[in-house]
Amino acid sequence: DIQMTQSPSTLSASVGDRVTITCRASQSISSWLAWYQQKPGKAPKLLMYKASSLESGVPSRFSGRGSGTEFTLTISSLQPDDFATYYCQQYNSYSLTFGQGTKLEIK
Amino acid sequence: QLQLQESGPGLVKPSETLSLTCGVSGGSISSSIYYWGWIRQPPEKGLEWIGNIYYNGSTYYNPSLRSRVTISVDTSKNQFSLKLTSVTAADTAVYYCARHVGQLVDYWGQGTLVTVSS
């Protein structure tokens, strides 16, 4: 299986801050990476796919970069609605794997 | 609008079989574009992909669960199902059904909590 490692596990930030979450794959996954946002008690929601493509309806303050084994999700100016847990997921292989999650907390 | 709805027992006894069904509305499970699958999340933990199925019955499973998992599809009822055998407390989780575009998970059901306990 391809292992996905996110950092940090927890991130404290304020409204208006620019934040970046990193996701590393144990082997190259080209650009087959997605990012999801999950709020308590809710299903995850797709934010980004193919590393840098924004899902329809997702605000443009979200952006993704990377290829191969290292990827980032950046939120350019945090809004109150953005405080949630974020997961990366590789879909390069037929056995999909997720990162362990990054909880974005209000400072 | 697409809706995915999980259904099944919320409590399963250890060593028994967990069975869930996902009803699909607002779209056809027979579409050649999509796979349909299951993902789970133990309480306060991360996400684990279980497997998926194409409308023709082709399946892909998580290697760590493959020996215990069966995913099946019923195109006549526009639904698909999950069976997980020999469950233990470690299988307690919220189980989500989900649509896959290729292998990208693009749409999730609301999830259903299944507790394994005697």
Image (cartoon, coloured by chain):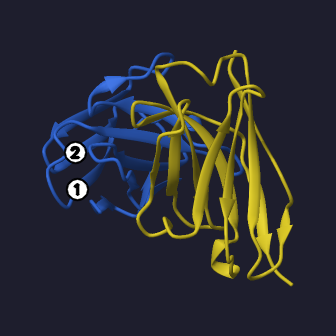
Chain colours: A blue, B yellow
**Residue A40: x percent and y percent?**
67, 51
The answer to which quarter of the image holds residue B19 is bottom right
Please name whichever residue, A39 or B6, is drawn nearer the observer in this view of the structure: B6
Would residue B16 be found to the left or right of residue B53 on screen? right
In this view, the residue in front, A50 or B72, is: B72
Mark 2, Cα crowd under 10 Å, few <14 / some 14-19 / many 20+, is many
Specify the amino acid type for callout 1. Answer: Arg
Provide residue A96's location: percent of width, then percent of height: 38, 51
Q: Quadrant of the C terminus of chain B?
A: bottom right
Residue appearing at x 53%, y 40% in the figure: B53
Horizontal arrangement in the rendering, residue B3 relative to residue A4 (left or right): right
Q: Secondary structure at mark 1?
A: strand
In the picture, the quarter occupied by the N terminus of chain B is top right
For label 2, the SS is strand
Nearest to the observer: residue B22 or residue A16? B22
Q: Residue at x 68, y 77 (%)?
A: B86
* Chain of the residue where label 1 is placed in the rendered structure: A
Q: Is residue A107 shown to the viewer in this render? A: no
Q: Residue at x 33, y 43 (%)?
A: A91
Q: Do dots 1 and 2 share one subunit?
A: yes
Mark closer to the chain start, 1 or 2: 1
* Residue pointed to by mark 2: A71
Left or right of residue A60, residue A92 in this image: left
Is residue A48 depicted above or below A37 in this figure?
above
Query: In this view of the protein, which residue sits in the foreground, A9 or A26?
Result: A26
Residue A27 visible: yes
The amino acid sitting under disc 2 is Phe
Q: Are marks 1 and 2 in contact (CB under 8 Å)?
A: yes
Give percent across and percent down for residue A26. Answer: 19, 61
Q: Quadrant of residue B72?
A: top right
Check disc 1: other Cα within 10 Å, few if <14, some if 14-19, many if 20+.
many
Residue that mark 1 sits on: A24
